[in-house]
Amino acid sequence: MKRVTIERMKRGALRFMVLSSLTEKPMYVYEIIKSIEGKTNGIYKPSPGSIYPVLRTLIKQNLVKVEEREEKKIYILTEEGRKKFEEMKAEKELLVDDNPLKRKILDSLFEIGFILYKHRKKLDERKMQQVIEILEKCKQNVDDLFKD
């Protein structure tokens, strides 16, 4: 089993958001970026440099196809891509399930990530060390809850 890393999670999340955007309509890269920015309420705006590798992978996997329109590339979700998105969406829903408390836990974790992203330019060595200490304590406290 592959180890889960932040980078792998980010790529998976970006892949999900690209597929989600393309379920709405065929889009140019700029539109995909704007769609994702809208879905995250402006907290995350992917760069073209992060979108293009994801699109190349999706094209290789036959989940997305590309056409030239007015000398621009437009990306279109294939039927296989639509099915894959629905599978990913179902997995995400299983992870969250209908329990509002579980949803709140997941929301809180993502909010912490977004807060750190929003303030990333203000993160100096001292603040990074403080954040690490806070998160390590939190991690230990949560782990302690499950010890019998």
Image (tube, rainbow, N blue to C red):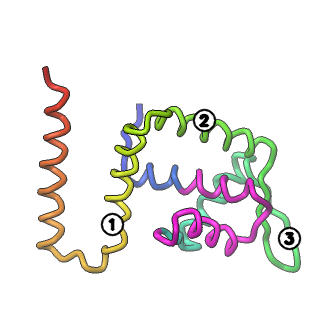
Q: Position of residue 10 (x, y in %)?
A: 46, 55
Amino acid marked by disc 2: Ala
Query: Residue 106 is drawn in which quadrant?
Result: top left
* Alpha carbons under labels 2 and 1: distance apart: 27 Å
* Alpha carbons under labels 3 and 2: distance apart: 32 Å
Callout 3: SS: strand
Region in magenta = 14-43
Quarter of the C terminus within the rendering: top left
Q: Position of residue 16 (x, y in %)?
A: 59, 51
Q: Is residue 85 above or below residue 48?
A: above
- Please give the name of the residue rendered at 54% of the width and 66% of the height, measured from the top-left corner: 50
- Please give the name of the residue rendered at 14% of the width and 56% of the height, measured from the top-left corner: 134
- Please give the name of the residue rendered at 18% of the width and 62% of the height, measured from the top-left corner: 131
Disc 1: which residue? 115
Horizontally, residue 48 falls left or right of residue 58, namely: left
Q: Position of residue 70 (x, y in %)?
A: 88, 79
Q: Is residue 130 above or below residue 136?
A: below
Disc 2: which residue? 90
Q: Residues within 10 Å of mark 2 (few under 14, many from 20)?
A: few
Q: Which mark is residue 68?
A: 3
